[in-house]
């Protein structure tokens, strides 16, 4: 019992004293969001875990690799790639396949808990506001399509496990405006992900290893 208490104390101590030097100008952020979920239209499988705002229902799974560069200690800009797949039953009990893609610019602004008067209550993480915009498409096999301008925005939280790795959760509104059979698609996405933070020297060393 004493060993368990000691281990727990060391874990808490280690977490509360994690350095947040990874959030520095000149550093890189690499990672991905991944998830599955429900959307209320078979063409609405935007990205991550989605609760669609259109009619009908569907299920989707997607992954969104992302990369960014810290232009300041709190602002990251980069790019995100969206890849998704939805399989659901159509009106005649036939399988309906939906494919999602996208390439978009990414922006993220970090806010430390102390900056919003939470003190040290959440010492191991940072809140952030993320937004993205670019091209994307939701294409249903032998069905309606929407291809055009995609955008999204919403808050999230990064829980740092150590100096380099953070687990993340975010809630984002996603919209897609374009041509095709359907002019507008939108959803509310719950995204889970992991990010790795590296300095320029660490990123270069990692690249050389590959």
Image (spheres, rainbow, N blue to C red):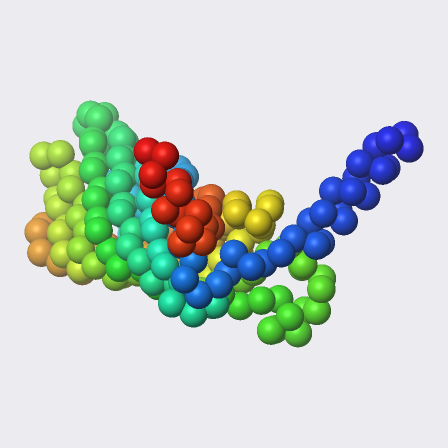
Using the image as rendered, state which of residue 128 and residue 201 is in the foreground. Answer: 201
* Residue shown at 58% from the left, 58% from the top: 20
* Residue shown at 41% from the left, 62% from the top: 26
User: In this rendering, would 33 be left or right of 42?
Assistant: right
Does residue 147 appear anywhere in the picture?
yes
Does residue 53 appear anywhere in the picture?
no
Residue 104 to residue 72: above or below: above
Image quadrant holding the C terminus, namely top left
The image shows residue 185 at horizontal and vertical percentages of: 23, 54
The image shows residue 82 at horizontal and vertical percentages of: 27, 45
- Picture quadrant of residue 77: bottom left
* Residue shown at 20% from the left, 25% from the top: 94
* Residue shown at 54% from the left, 62% from the top: 127
Using the image as rendered, state which of residue 88 and residue 79 is in the foreground. Answer: 79
Using the image as rendered, state which of residue 30 and residue 101 is in the foreground. Answer: 30
The image shows residue 44 at horizontal and vertical percentages of: 26, 47
Residue 61 to residue 183: above or below: above
């Amino acid at each position: 019992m004493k060993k368990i208490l000691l281990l727990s104390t060391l874990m808490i101590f280690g977490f509360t004293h994690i350095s947040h030097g990874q959030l520095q100008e000149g550093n890189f952020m690499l990672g991905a969001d991944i998830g599955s979920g429900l959307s209320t239209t078979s063409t609405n499988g935007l990205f991550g875990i989605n609760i669609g705002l259109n009619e009908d229902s569907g299920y989707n799974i997607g992954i969104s690799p992302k990369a960014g560069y810290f232009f300041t200690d709190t602002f990251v800009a980069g790019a995100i790639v969206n890849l998704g797949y939805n399989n659901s039953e159509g009106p005649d009990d036939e399988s309906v396949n939906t494919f999602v893609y996208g390439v978009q610019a990414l922006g993220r602004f970090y806010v430390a808990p102390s900056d919003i008067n939470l003190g040290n209550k959440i010492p191991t993480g940072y809140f952030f506001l993320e937004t993205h915009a670019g091209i994307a498409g939701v294409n249903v096999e032998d069905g309606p399509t929407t291809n055009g301008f995609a955008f999204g925005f919403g808050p999230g939280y990064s829980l740092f496990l150590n100096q380099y790795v953070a687990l993340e959760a975010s809630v984002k509104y996603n919209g897609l405006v374009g041509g095709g059979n359907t002019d507008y698609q939108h959803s509310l996405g719950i995204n889970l992900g992991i990010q790795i933070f590296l300095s320029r020297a660490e990123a270069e060393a990692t690249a050389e290893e590959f």
